[in-house]
Amino acid sequence: MKISELFGKGRAVFSFEVFPPKKDSGVESITAAVDEIAALKPDYISVTYGAGGNTANTFTRDIAAHIKNDCKIEAMAHITCVNNTKEEVLTVLDSFAEAGIENILALRGDINPNVPPKTDFKHASEMITFIREQGKYDNIGISGACYPEGHTESESITDDILNLRKKVDAGAEELISQLFFDNAFFYDFREKAKIAGINIPISAGIMPVTSKSQIERMVTMCGASLPQKFVRMVTKYEHRPEALIDAGIAYAADQITDLLANGVDGIHLYTMNNPYIARKITDMVGKLL
Ligand code: FAD
């Protein structure tokens, strides 16, 4: 089933994201966590795609196939084009299809300064156009990424939204947002996207904070703004790791409650493979969807 078909049914779509293990650990190293997360029965689970090559691709496929075929939860496999040629994209897509995976999140991927990017695709929209042109992947649902505070490489949010429109015109059927800690950015972005003629569902990406170093890493990577309320919370609990996790969960649940009250299409929870976080958030917001 295409993920886009889950929307418009009178309730927000609730999804989780997990990531594959590092190269030298096997898929089995995260199966128990994935099973616990899947047992919470989200609408779908997406699996990230390492920009690091074949092992990562295989892990993404294997975990997504396990979610879909063994856990019986709809699965979405991420795929990046920064490190794939046209031929490689087709090989990966065929291997996803053979494993029963019917949905992808089509991404460019982050450019690693130490690894020259492959040159067949410059942007995610080009990969989406290429996939759609093949004709044989029409039953694959394609989602794309979006950035409530603008992508770090964009000169302005307006430029970024005009580029996002190209991604939608190319065939993306649903968008998942980058994480943010201030809902005002999401509402503003959603309004601007609508004005730009983007009418597909937009799910809000929510990441509960688990440690100060995680937040510092995220802010460096994606440039998310940190509201005062959030900074005060992290400062108060930074030396009490368990309390910080619970405070982060409470903050995320508060964000989600507000998003739901404001008619968000979907909530995409970055679980960081942590069943405790996924379970607590599900308990807190499950009845509100
Ligand atoms: P694009 O859509 O190509 O956009 C990148 C930049 O180019 C933007 O500034 C955009 O405005 C600009 N642009 C886009 N199209 C055009 C155009 N036609 N002309 C000119 N400029 C253009 N990374 C991973 O490696 N693996 C993952 O699994 C992964 N999962 C993610 C999941 C989500 C929900 C999100 C939000 C991000 C994820 N990322 C992942 C990170 C993502 O790969 C990076 O943010 C990357 O830098 C941009 O990817 P994109 O698909 O948005 O790129």
Image (spheres, rainbow, N blue to C red):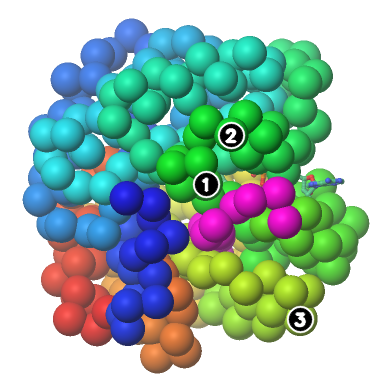
Quickly name the residue at label 1.
Answer: 142
- Tell me if mark 1 has few (under 14), some (14-19) or many (20+) residues whose alpha carbon lies within 10 angstroms of its own: many
Q: Earlier in the sequence, mark 2 or mark 1?
A: 2
186 and 213: which is toward the camera: 186
User: Residue 266, relative to residue 259: is it above or below?
Assistant: above
**Which quadrant of the view contains residue 4?**
bottom left
Task: Give residue 135's mark.
Answer: 2
Distance of label 2 from label 1 (alpha carbons): 14 Å
Circle 2: element type: loop
- On screen, residue 30 versus residue 109, left or right, reads left
Q: Is residue 208 visible?
A: no
Q: Are marks 2 and 1 in contact (CB under 8 Å)?
A: no
- Amino acid type at circle 2 is Gly
Mark before the other along the chain sequence, 1 or 3: 1
Residue 71 x, y percent position in the rendering? 12, 40
Q: Pinpoint residue 159: horizontal percent, then vertical percent.
A: 87, 61
**Dot 2 alpha-carbon crowd within 10 angstroms: few under 14, some 14 to 19, many 20 or more:** few
